[in-house]
Every structure is written in structure tokens, then in C-alpha cells.
Image (spheres, rainbow, N blue to C red):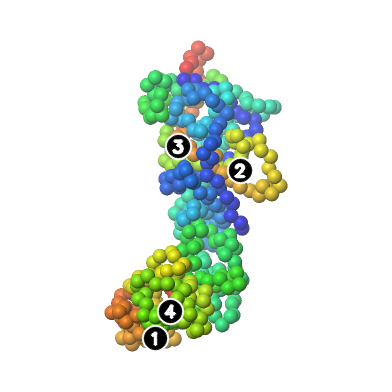
Amino acid sequence: MVVPVFINQQQIGLRLLELPSDVVNLVESESAPTLFLKSSETSTQHAQSSGNAVLCTPSKTFPIRQVHSSNVLYILQQTAESGYSAIAQCKGMLELVPSQEDVLTQVRQQLPVHALGITTRINVTRIALSERTPFSEGEIEDALRELCVFEEGGILCIPSVTNLREAWNSLLTAATINGVKLDQLWNIADMEKQVIEDQINIEIYRAVVRRLSESPSLLEAKLDAAQTTAWVGSVLLASSEKATYEKSFVAQWQDQLPESWRELANMKLLQASLLFGVVLWLTVTRTSTVLL
Amino acid sequence: MPSIPLHPPRVDRAGPSEETDSIPPLLETPLGLALMEIQGHINFPTQTDSDTPIGRLVFPDFNASIDSAASEGPWMKKVYFYIGHQRMLGQVKKLPKPLAVVGKKNLLGDGAESKMDVDEMREELEILEIVKWKIVFSSRPEPVGEGEND
């Protein structure tokens, strides 16, 4: 078999991008999504990779690295006359490498913490956040949910630990009054009366419910008892004004839980923040939000 | 900075060639793209218009009746690339990871002629094709006599 090879005088600009198998499967699937190339302005610590460009699928992020080669790769295209014509040449390719960055940190660094209406950071809208954060939409959404980020006048904001504590207290009160078991399906709107009465920011309440709910529904929620207990403990820990002995902390914690969950409050759930049995309160945890 | 869309390969993409038996089926892709890796560089005359012939690829062990399906086989071990009176010995290799050929949107294929609107000027990229094989020539060219061929 003989294939004549030509070189096209008008070389075109093409790049070669090496794809991991899961990305290949994604782009070759019938309903292949559009991918996005983003670049990060904030991160400098991994600047040795080519710029700071990343490739985002709907749910994953891959930093891009430029790899040079001493060999030349010609991109050939079959011609109408059953030959090959070299239409482009590349002296290297782009590789995708596993991400080293942490989306939570990046989102947190960009958003103001809601406290007494004073914000020290530049206002960021949801669209601007996507453009400025070199991560996939799925990962950004997860981070927003994890941090209970809420919108106020189109601006994104992270609740302070006090905000979170108040929202949780209000939800707990509402559940007690209405005889609702939080670990069984309950109607989100039904509890909002109490929240409004308590003068809790409704958006923060909803963000907390989204964070804790097992289901993505906006109408009904069901909380996982163990996970919610851990979250309540970490919020309590982050909002503690001073070092406390373990015993009194656990007692406080239990008081913040539905009656049937009291036994779940266990310091093991909060291990990462503990030292010598005394609860340590870290300034960093307080100024950002709950760190665990 | 705003993000740049990278569109997946178009399902209906097709290249200029309609011949299906002109290259080993294993190397065929919808757009007819293939990769050829060469140690060094091909110098070619910087001349005017269209395509300049530079040589020919020969798959001496490829037998259409045996290797007709898109299958791997011993034929991949030997590929010649003749340029003038020299030839290089190479082989067809599977890429460690598939390579996406990325270019500006609508660069190749059917949509190539469509003119860009002003508001389409912002950069959009497209995976034109995903290539899984390459033809590699890693040895130096050797001279061949006049009659010695194919």
C-alpha cells in the first residue's frame, strides 16, 4: 500500500492535546459537553506549568502543561486524491496533569464574609466567580454549597460562623415547634416562618439547608444525622470565643442538636481540630469559615 | 480572564477524501487526520500555491484482504517513508494517550467555508479530531538506489 504525501503550503495553527481516557469517553459520547479553558490569575505557586491554564469538564479540572519535543509531529489529512497532506506541524503537545489546587481555598479567598454588613473584599457575582476561578462548574458549585455561600443583591457572600450558628438554631427551633424530625423528609418552606420571625437572613437559611440536605430538592430536605452533627460541632467550635474543656464543649454541642441526636456528638467527629483534649480555637478558622 | 469554549468533535464531521481503501483502516478517522512523527525536520521548497509532493508512505506488509478490518497486526512494524532518494523506516504505534487535534472552530471540514461574523470573532476552539495512533520514524534516513522501491 502506497500513500503519496504532500505538504500543504498554507500550514494552519493546530495544537495537540493529550487526553486522559475519561475525558476521551466524555467528548466521544453522543451528548458530549463543551469543555472550557480557563486561566487563573490568583495562583502563582504552580506557575511552572504552562501559564496557569486549566481544562474544565463539567465536573473536573485539569491543569495544562506544555511539553516540548525534539521530534516534529506532522498532522496529516487525507486528500481527495487518496494521499496525505501535511497541514500542520507541532513541536510538542499539551498534557493534562492532576490538579494540585484546592477549589474551596480559591473560592473562599475571593468571597467576602458576611458580618455586620461590612465586607472587605471586592464584590463578586456568580458569573465573575466562574470566570476567575480555574475550576469546573461542578467543583465550583460543590464549593459554594460546602461554604454555604449565598447571594445578596447579586453578590456572593460567605456566612460568618455566627450567621451559620443562628441559622441552625432557628431551624432547630422550628423543627421542635413543628414536631419535625430533621432526618426524615420535611418541607423546607414550612420552617421558613420561624426563620423569618427570628430575623435570620432567609438566603443564609436556605444555603445552610442546601449544605446539609441529602437531596438536591429545593422543596423538601432530609438531613443525615451524623454528618449534620459533625457540621454543627465544627460551626460551634469555630465560633467559640476561647479555649474550652472538652466536656463542657460536648455538653454545649449536644444542646444544639435534636434530642435524638445527642449521643452522636463525639469529639472523634472533629478530630482534625483537637489537641490534648482541649478544644483549640484558631483565628484562621474564625475569619474565614469553618475549616475542617 | 474569560473562559474559552472548547467544543467536542462534531458528530457529522467528514474529510475531503471519500476513498476508504487508500490507507490502513486502523489509521482512518472521520476527518482523515493522522499523525506522523519525524526525528528532525523536512525542508521543503517555499513555493507558491497548493500542495507540494514530498514523498510517499509505504506499508509493505499491509495486506488489504487480511488486514481489512481496523485491526492491529504485524504490518504495523514496518512503514517506509520515501523522500527523494532516501527513505526512513518507521512503524505505526498506539499513542500512550489519545491526542485531541485542537484548532479554531470550523477550521476544517464542511463548515470551513462559513464566514465568521463579527460577534463570532471571540476565540472559540474545537476538538477537530481525536487521534489514537501515530506513524513514527525515529531512525535516520538511509539512501536507496533508483530501482529499489516499495
Q: Quadrant of the C terminus of chain A?
A: bottom left
- Between circles 4 and 1, the one closer to the viewer is 4
Q: Secondary structure at mark 2?
A: strand
Q: Residue at x 61, y 40 (%)?
A: B106
- Return the chain for callout 3: B
The residue identified by callout 1 is A243
Q: Residue at x 47, y 65 (%)?
A: A143
The residue identified by callout 3 is B132
- Return the chain for callout 2: B
Q: CA distance from mark 4 to mark 2?
A: 52 Å
Task: Tell me which amino acid carries mark 3.
Answer: Lys
Along the horizontal axis of the image, is A178 left or right of A11? left
Q: Position of residue B67 (x, y in %)?
A: 39, 24
Q: Secondary structure at mark 1?
A: loop
The residue identified by callout 2 is B104
Label 4 crowd bin: few (<14), some (14–19), many (20+), radius 10 Å:
many
- Return the chain for callout 4: A
Kindly indicate whether the residue at mark 2 contacts the one at mark 3 (C-beta within 8 angstroms).
Answer: no
Along the horizontal axis of the image, is A77 left or right of A247? right
Of the pair A96 and B131, the residue shown nearer to us: B131
Q: Residue at x 60, y 34 (%)?
A: B110
Of the pair A120 and A46, the residue shown nearer to us: A120
Q: CA distance from mark 4 to mark 1?
A: 27 Å
Q: Is residue A283 visible?
A: no
- Disc number at residue A171? 4
- Between circles 1 and 2, the one closer to the viewer is 2
- Between circles 4 and 3, the one closer to the viewer is 4
Kindly indicate whether the residue at mark 1 contacts the one at mark 3 (C-beta within 8 angstroms).
Answer: no
Task: Tell me which amino acid carries mark 2.
Answer: Lys
- Between circles 4 and 2, the one closer to the viewer is 4
Mark 3 / mark 2, whichever is N-terminal: 2
Label 3 crowd bin: few (<14), some (14–19), many (20+), radius 10 Å:
some
